[in-house]
Each structure stands twice: as structure tokens, then as C-alpha cells.
Amino acid sequence: MNRKVLLIEDDLQMQSLISDYLKDYHFDCISFVNPKDALDEFCKNQDFCIAILDLMLPGMDGFDLFKKLKQIKDIPIIISSARGDIGNKIHGFELGVDDYLAKPYEPRELVLRIEYILKKYSSKKIEVGAFEINKENREVIVDNFPVEFTKIEFEIFIFLIDNLNKISSREQILHATSLDPNTKNRTIDMHISNIRYKIGDDSKNPKYIKSVWGVGYKFVS
């Protein structure tokens, strides 16, 4: 399980305390004082499981940093801040933060909250062979590479995954998606072709999405 944590905290004493404590619980904590440096690192390496950020940072407000991180990748984020008033907490949760800890707090509480959030996030993910799928965030990773599906492609892909090793007719696929009810079969075939291309499935000899002549398709594991 990935346990790499991105920590953005400009109080060096607090940063050291959090980092050392997380390491005691087998987390790999990468720490930054400057939010711009943290963003640069996050753009290059997005394999963090969670981010912890202060609000009062040099050159950038923590809420602005939160939004920039989320634009790059949707990972869980905890606010760790001395701004513990209800107004800031409400604003944070309205933006979509996963948790908000008002300083001072016990580092053990932070660890427990991280563990709970990671457990919650992992329950939303499923693994099928080489595929990692997060239905809620509409994320698909195959062989550690993210796949960029359109809305319709994702709906078809998930329907086939949900019916793993079962034959799905074109009519069933049509009704399981937001496609127009009058959509032609060849349009569904085109979407299947695009999905195969994006997951690296050879259309002439597919490994994952098999064609069932005269019926439809089957996703095999």
C-alpha cells in the first residue's frame, strides 16, 4: 500500500514533529515549506497517497494551494492549521477537504485520521487484473498508467467490468449508459474500439474485451 505523504508546513518545528511521527508509523513523509516547491514536486511525482497542508503559508494561501493540488490529481487532503475557527472549517469542507485539524493537536490523532481516510479511499477502489479502478473519481489505471476515458467510454467500461466474464449485448450496454436510446450499434462498436485502443487491447486479437459474434462483448479477466 502506498504510504507516501506530502506535507506542506512552514513552521519547521511543527514540520519536524509531524514528519518524525509519521515515519514512526511507516509513512514516507516528503516535506516542504514553500507551497510553490510543493506544487512543482507534485506535478512531477503524483504518487502521494495523501497531503497535509497548513493554511498560513509563504506566498500562497492554503485554500488556494488545496485547489491547485486537486486540479493536478484528486488525492485526499487534510488541513492542519491554527486557523481553527468555524468559518475556516466550513469553508474548507465546502471546498472538499477530507479533514480539518485545528492546532494544537496530538500527532497520534493525525495518524489515526490519515489511516481512516486512506481506508475509506481504498474501499472505493477495485482491482481487476492489471486494472485499478476508482468508480467515484472516474479513474482507471492499467499497468500503472492512467487511462483518459470520455464519460460514455467510462460508463461502458464499468458496465463490462461489473459483468466480468459475462456476455453483454449491445442493447444492454446501451441501456446501462447515458447514450441516446436511438443510438446505432455501430456507435457502440466505435466506443468499444476507442476503449480497446486506450487500454492497449489489440482489436484483432483482444486480450480483455472479446467480441461475441452477433451478440455483443465480454470483458475477460
Image: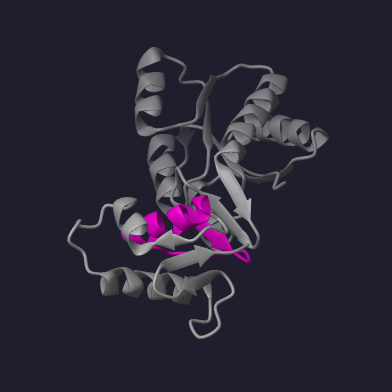
Q: Nearest the camera: 24 or 142?
A: 142
Location of residue 164 with respect to 18 vertically, above or below: below
Task: Describe residue 215's horizontal placement relative to residue 4 as left or right.
Answer: left
Residue, far bottom: 204
Q: Percent x, y for residue 174?
A: 30, 57
Q: Residue at x 40, y 68 (%)?
A: 215
Residue 41 seen by the camera: yes
Measuring from the top left, give residue 29's x and y in whole percent.
70, 43
Q: Nearer the viewer, residue 183 or 139?
A: 183
Q: Is residue 154 magenta?
A: yes
Quadrant of image for the C terminus: bottom right
7 in relation to 158, above or below: above
Residue at 47% x, 16% y is 84
Q: Is residue 31 magenta?
A: no
Residue 74 drawn at (x, y percent): 47, 47
x 52%, y 36%: residue: 77
- Classify 171 as above or below 199: above
Relative placement, left or right, of 39 versus 117 is left
Residue ranking furthest to the front: 214
The quarter of the picture where residue 93 lies is top left
Q: Magenta stretch: give its range.
A: 139-163
Please tell me which residue is depicted at 72% across the width and 30% down the height of the picture: 17
